[in-house]
Image (tube, rainbow, N blue to C red):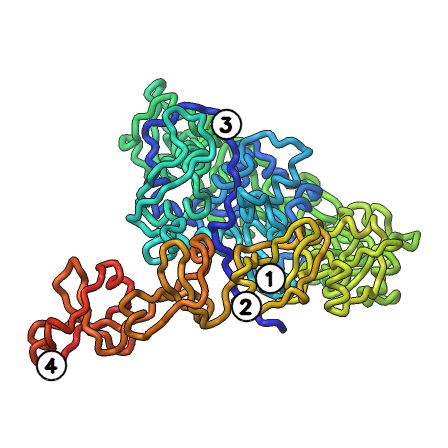
């Protein structure tokens, strides 16, 4: 199994031109230095689960609230357990496509990022929460949902091709792991002092003042650039992700403060009519007095809010008792679930171990303020039948699904059947048949078309796919009725076996199916890697499979396109710019440069400049600072060390290139060197690359002399590693 290398694509390369606001007047309370509290940034308890996110999306009329099978396919969730495991997906084996709300919740669990932050980013970047999305741009908006890998300068790349990958990241064709939007934000937040945009060649930290660009100038009094002091780690992370105040992070703040200004559980009373609401996940919910008593809420402590302030929150359902509270109204028992009272039979109450003697007695008027729920079904997974009717059902998702003779045997449920009154069976909603187990091969009662069950859908199998997947005719089950097979949602054609090389019938186009997607392979890469197709599939079949990252040339390949002289080095599956000096530094020869069609080069992901040769000594052409490149990072060499060690640069690179390379610790002075900062009286001695403070007593005991002390800028002293004071 290939070792996964965890790579972080610099957030500075991933900025999307954010979704544009129309308002011209800036809210006076906006503070660009503190966009959101640190405590809110990592509060993963908001919403309480995917259901809360779903309710919020529905309240906003969001396209993401769509739970139809056709829409879920557009979210590009891969059908590959090992890929999901590599991406730390908490539900790699769920066996079905998840809704947008479920993916947002799981991405929050995976990364530790507040789902509110994810929702606000989805709105800021693509307007996916509260805007009407043009159907013609819907797929593109979903594919770039978080604006991740979408630099202003070059447009969106193809490493994160879909809603799922934007949230969770991706693994390229060489097995390298790339962080997605959520972990990228948390990586910046989790740095000890925060990690903001680059400042003087290194990431800015909390307390630093950074010059931030504004992308548009149609706000009143807003300049093209402004100085922002990073007030906390959340703010640093957000500016690293989107290095603009307007329209980027101002929009983030505006949506966040509008939807989530008050924490969950805040009580607000309208100054207009005295109605009290509780704020829950961006919604305002009216609080009946009996619910306040049950939940121990002090209505007297509510904040008085104006109608205008309350209008910022969408109206949610009436705040209800806690789940599984039982109420008795006119002789009928009701169970509260998600704020809705459901009538329940004695069988269901017994199954839930409800003590009806402790039920709450309410008036019908008390119950009327809540939506009326359907009859509460038995627990999911319960197998039931009536006393007279022989049909057997599985309770699933609040409905009864009928077992066919085949699924009754396949799931071996004969000993699990519970008999309840036929009258009770009659009142429960029924929907289709129990779907066969994942991976079951099925056919209709007549006809030769074969399907495989995948994520509760039936995926068509062409003869070529049937062969590719290694299936056998004897394993195909003929279902007994057309109604049963018709009740199973039809999905796209089944994907081929992982690692399949295939072409399109009648076309030279070549692909590899890997990590749940098809990856294009150019003629050059096919020849370079010795790849030949093992199968040919019809174009109408292939078009249903998700598009993946282009298979890159081998690492170390130097190439250019036909219409430009720019040279690139392929490294870790991405293109890195090679300037003339870098080309010389790395010892390349022009006879090895490969020229490829423009479209082929443009399809490959790019990632800044190539790295110089290991142990290269070089200078910044503009600042004349000296560095050595070792172990994949640049290490500054201060003038004292240059003089001590007799180091001279062999190459000179421009500032933007030097700033783009990863930064390591500076090269320390020789052991035994005494140093002191120009703004401090503390003296240090260098031992094993580490500074140790030297007290006056120890200084005299060792016979050190003041003239031995090297006075260095305080900023240099701070960059060296410091340990315990010299004790002897």
Spatial distance from mark 1 to mark 2, Cα to Cα? 10 Å
Residue 569, numbered circle: 1
Q: For the point 38% across and 69% down, which residue is it?
A: 648
Residue located at (86% from left, 50% from top): 481
**Whole-percent x and y of residue 482?**
86, 47
**Whole-number angstrom distance, CA of label 4 to CA of label 2:** 47 Å
The alpha-carbon separation of the residues under discs 1 and 4 comes to 53 Å
Q: Secondary structure at mark 4?
A: loop
Along the line of sight, the residue nearer the viewer: 449 or 644? 644
The spot of residue 678 in percent (x, y) is: 17, 60
Q: Earlier in the sequence, mark 2 or mark 3?
A: 3
> Which residue is under mark 4?
702
- At x 27% / y 30%, what residue is drawn? 300
The C terminus - image quarter:
bottom left
Number of the front mark, 1 or 2 = 2
Residue 607 vs 373, above or below: the answer is below
Residue 251 screen position, x and y as percent: 45, 34
Whether residues under marks 1 and 2 lie with C-beta atoms below 8 angstroms apart, the answer is: yes
Q: Which residue is mark 3?
A: 368
Q: Label 2, on which residue?
A: 586
Q: Residue at x 65, y 50 (%)?
A: 564
Residue 274 place in picture, x, y as percent: 34, 22
């Amino acid at each position: 199994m290939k070792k996964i290398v965890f790579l972080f694509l610099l957030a500075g390369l991933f900025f999307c031109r954010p979704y544009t606001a129309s308002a011209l007047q800036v809210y006076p309370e906006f503070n660009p230095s503190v966009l959101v509290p640190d405590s809110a940034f990592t509060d993963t308890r908001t919403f309480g689960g995917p259901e809360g996110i779903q309710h919020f999306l529905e309240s906003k009329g969001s396209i993401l609230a769509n739970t139809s099978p056709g829409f879920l396919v557009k979210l590009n969730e891969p059908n590959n357990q090992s890929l999901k495991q590599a991406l730390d997906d908490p539900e790699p084996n769920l066996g079905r496509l998840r809704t947008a709300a479920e993916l947002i919740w799981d991405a929050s669990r995976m990364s530790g990022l507040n789902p509110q932050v994810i929702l606000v980013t989805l709105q800021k970047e693509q307007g996916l929460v509260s805007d009407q999305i043009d159907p013609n741009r819907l797929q593109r908006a979903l594919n770039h949902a978080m604006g991740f890998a979408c630099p202003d300068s070059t447009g969106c790349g193809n490493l994160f091709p879909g809603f799922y990958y934007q949230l969770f990241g991706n693994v390229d064709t060489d097995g390298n792991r790339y962080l997605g939007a959520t972990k990228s934000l948390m990586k910046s937040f989790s740095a000890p002092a925060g990690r903001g945009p680059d400042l003087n060649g290194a990431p800015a930290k909390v307390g630093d003042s950074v010059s931030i660009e504004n992308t548009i100038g149609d706000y009143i009094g807003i300049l093209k650039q402004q100085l922002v002091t990073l007030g906390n780690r959340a703010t640093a992370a957000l500016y690293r992700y989107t290095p603009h105040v307007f329209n980027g992070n101002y929009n983030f703040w505006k949506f966040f403060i509008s939807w989530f200004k008050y924490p969950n559980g805040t009580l607000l009373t309208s100054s207009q009519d005295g109605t009290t609401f509780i704020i829950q996940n961006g919604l305002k919910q009216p609080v009946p007095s009996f619910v306040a008593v049950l939940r121990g809420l002090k209505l007297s402590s509510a904040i008085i809010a104006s109608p205008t302030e309350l209008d910022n929150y969408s109206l949610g359902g009436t705040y209800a008792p806690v789940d599984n509270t039982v109420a008795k109204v006119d002789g009928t028992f009701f169970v509260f679930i998600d704020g809705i009272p459901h009538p329940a039979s004695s069988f269901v109450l017994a199954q839930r171990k409800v003590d009806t003697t402790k039920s709450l007695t309410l008036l019908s008027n008390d119950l009327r303020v809540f939506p009326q729920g359907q009859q509460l079904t038995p627990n999911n997974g319960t197998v039931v039948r009536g006393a007279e009717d022989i049909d057997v059902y599985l309770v699933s998702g609040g409905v009864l699904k009928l077992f066919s003779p085949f699924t009754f045997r396949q799931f071996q449920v004969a000993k699990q059947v519970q008999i309840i009154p036929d009258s009770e069976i009659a009142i429960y909603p029924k929907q289709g048949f129990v779907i066969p187990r994942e991976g079951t091969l099925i056919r209709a009662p007549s006809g030769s078309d074969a399907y495989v069950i995948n994520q509760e859908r039936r995926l068509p199998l062409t003869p070529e796919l049937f062969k590719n997947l290694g299936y056998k005719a004897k394993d195909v089950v003929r279902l007994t009725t057309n109604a049963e097979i018709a009740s199973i949602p039809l999905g796209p054609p089944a994907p081929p076996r992982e690692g399949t090389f295939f072409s399109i019938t009648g076309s030279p186009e070549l692909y590899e199916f890997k990590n749940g997607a098809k990856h294009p392979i150019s003629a050059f890469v096919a020849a370079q890697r010795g790849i030949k197709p093992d199968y040919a599939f019809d174009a109408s079949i292939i078009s249903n499979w998700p598009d993946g990252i282009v298979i890159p040339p081998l690492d170390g390949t130097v190439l250019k396109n036909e219409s430009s002289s720019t040279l690139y080095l392929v490294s870790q599956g991405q293109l890195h710019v090679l300037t003339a000096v870098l080309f010389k530094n790395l010892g390349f020869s022009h006879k090895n440069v490969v020229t490829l069609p423009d479209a082929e080069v443009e399809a490959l992901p790019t990632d800044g400049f190539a790295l110089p040769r290991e142990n290269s000594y070089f200078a910044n052409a503009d600042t004349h600072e000296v560095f050595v490149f070792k172990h994949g990072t640049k290490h500054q060499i201060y003038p004292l060390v240059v003089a001590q060690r007799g180091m001279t640069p062999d190459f000179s690179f421009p500032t933007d290139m030097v700033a783009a390379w990863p930064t390591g610790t500076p090269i320390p002075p020789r052991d035994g060197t005494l140093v002191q900062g120009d703004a401090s009286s503390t003296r240090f001695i260098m031992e094993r690359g580490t500074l140790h403070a030297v007290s006056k007593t120890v200084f005299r005991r060792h016979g050190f002399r003041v003239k031995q002390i090297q006075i260095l800028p305080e900023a240099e002293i701070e960059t060296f590693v410091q340990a315990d004071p010299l004790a002897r």
